[in-house]
Structures are given as structure tokens and as C-alpha cells.
Amino acid sequence: MDVRTKENIKVFKTIESLREWGQKQAHDGLSVGFVPTMGALHEGHLSLVRQAHKKCDVVIVSIYVNPAQFAPHEDLAKYPCNLDRDLDILSDTDSCDVVFLPRSSDIYPAGIPLEVNKQQGTFVEVKGISHQMEGQTRPIFFRGVATICAKLFNIIQPDHVFFGQKDAQQCIVIRNMIRDLHFPIEMHVGETIREKDGLAMSSRNQYLTSATRSYATVLYRALIAAKAEFEEFGAKTRNKILGPAFELIQQAIEEVARDEKLGFEIKLDYLSLVNPNSLEEVEIVEVGRGFILSGAVWVGKTRLIDNLLINYSL
């Protein structure tokens, strides 16, 4: 079936059926809010759904694990997936009207091999702000994100879209794409939702074991230390601001390495202090200028990302 109902939610699986529904909403003058996800939903996603519900007449959530944003060596095959659970918790919010479950054969009619040199069809790249930070380690990631968002925006034609600050660079990339491709969409960014100890909620947190979970806040604590160096101690240069963050992460790396019984490693991917417009690294913070502190670390087999916005909002 193209359409089914999960309690109070309509579930669409084809572009045609969703567009037919969308045309009726437009005819009735209803505003449409859209929250794109890859499933494995958590409170961060649900906070965006509730935000959309407050702003819009109807809310659509897409659940689609997008192959185009994964490199061949990454975790596409094991990415967390539990559709029934996702539909249940969306239903419990009383804030979601429609779930869209597109098929890869519809999204990528020419197919979607993970090797970029084998891909055919149309892809979207946002130049100038996709190669820094996350783009250093995941060079095809934002090409895949921009492509799937452009396709879903075209299919759904929402009035408002909702993203989370945890993926700050993604928000900046998508906001620029909306501007450059003249999508008539207003973008909203929700704050990062955290566990009680500060760990940013993420679908990939499901990969954490009890041992690695105890070290999973290392990146957040490092970013907080860098923020304090700027706000409380007046540091202005990149090296001085990030210095305490590098030291804290190095201490965690050495602590884990000394305990062979733990059986995992902590590895720093990157720490960044960037201009929020260009995403270029900042060497000296000018008075009155905002910046983004961000980073990524591996704790065992789980890659964690996080960021703090300083004198800046998305």
C-alpha cells in the first residue's frame, strides 16, 4: 500500500501519494512544516517535531537513511533502524501528522552506488562551506546531505524546515542552499538537546558500550573548557582558546591507553574555531565577532561530534 495509517499519523511511501496529499494542504491554505531525519529518533528529533507543530498547521517527518552521504567505508549498513519504534514515539508526541518513507529507487532513479565515481544523475554541492570541519574527514558528506534535502524539499514543498544545532555546519550548508536555489522555505534551527551529563543526543550514541559511554562526554567537556578560556580568562588567539580543549582530550586518550582492560581507544579527529559565515579557521578573535567551536572524536568505534556557538546564533 502507498498509504497507511499509524494511529494518528498518515504514512506515505511514494512521491505521488505524498504530493497528492500535499496539494490538498496547499489548496486548503495550510502551512507545512518538515523535519528530515534518518530515523533512530531521539529527543533531539522530537524537540524539532514539537517546534514544527507550534509553528505550522501540519507536520511531515521523513525517515530515510540516505546512501549518498556515506562513503564506502562508513556505517551505512549498520546505521540504527527501528521503524516501528520511530512511528510509535512520533505518534506519542501528538505533533506529527505525516511520515514519509521514500524508497531509494524513487529518490535516486539512476541508482546510488557509494563510490562517487560510479554515481550517475543529479547531485547538489554547496561550494566554499562544505570542505571544512566535517568535510575534512567526510569529503562527500555535504554533497549527499544537500542532494537529499533538495530532493525532499522539491517533493514535499514545505513552508518551514527544522534542523538541529548539533549539526551546525549542516545547518549553514542547507541555509545557503535554500538561498542559492531560491526555495520558498523558512529554516529554523533548534538547540542541541543533551543528556544530563552534557552528551549531545545522537542516533549513533546507540553504538556506545557501557565502557565507552563513560568517556563519551570528553568532547563536550573539551569545548566547554575552550569556551571558558575565551569568556572567563580573556583568551583571544586560536591556540590559547583551544589549548585547554586539546589538553583535556589528550588526558583522556592517555588515561584510556593506560588501562588495557578497557579495550578501546580515544582518537581526536579535529577541533575547530571558525568564522560562522565562511567556516574558515580563525586565528585571532576580533572584538564583537562570533565564532563556532566544534570538533569530532572517536570513542572506541563511535564517532561523536559537537559544537558550541559563541556570540552567534544559527
Image: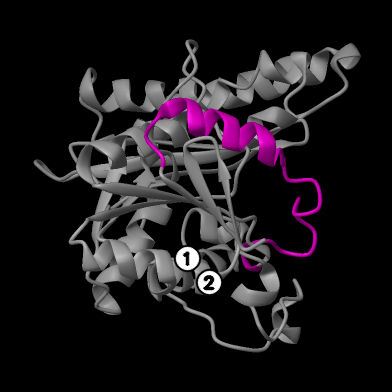
**Which mark identifies residue 202?**
none
Is 209 or 229 nearer to us in this picture?
Answer: 209
Q: Residue at x 58, y 26 (%)?
A: 249
Say whether residue 225 is visible.
yes
Say whether residue 246 is visible.
no
Q: Position of residue 280 (x, y in %)?
A: 35, 59
- Gap in Å between the C-alphas at discs 2 and 1? 5 Å
Query: Along the horizontal axis of the image, is 5 left or right of 43?
Result: right
The residue beneath circle 1 is: 18
Quadrant of residue 206 within the rendered picture: top right
Specify whether residue 89 is painted magenta: yes
Specify whether residue 74 is painted magenta: yes
Q: Looking at the picture, does residue 249 appear above or below residue 28? A: above
Circles 2, 1 touching at the beta carbon (< 8 Å) = yes
Q: What amino acid type is highlighted by mark number 1?
A: Leu
Dot 2: element = helix
Q: Residues within 10 Å of mark 1 (few under 14, many from 20)?
A: many
Q: Looking at the picture, does residue 168 appear above or below residue 223? A: below
The residue beneath circle 2 is: 15
Quadrant of residue 218 within the rendered picture: top right
Is 70 or 30 nearer to us in this picture?
Answer: 30
Query: Along the horizontal axis of the image, is 282 left or right of 223?
Result: left
Q: Which residues are magenta?
A: 68-96
Dot 1: element = helix
Q: Position of residue 4 (x, y in %)?
A: 59, 51
Q: Residue at x 24, y 78 (%)?
A: 182
Q: Residue at x 68, y 64 (%)?
A: 67
Q: Position of residue 40 (x, y in %)?
A: 63, 38
Quadrant of residue 172 within the rendered picture: bottom left
Q: Residue at x 43, y 40 (%)?
A: 294
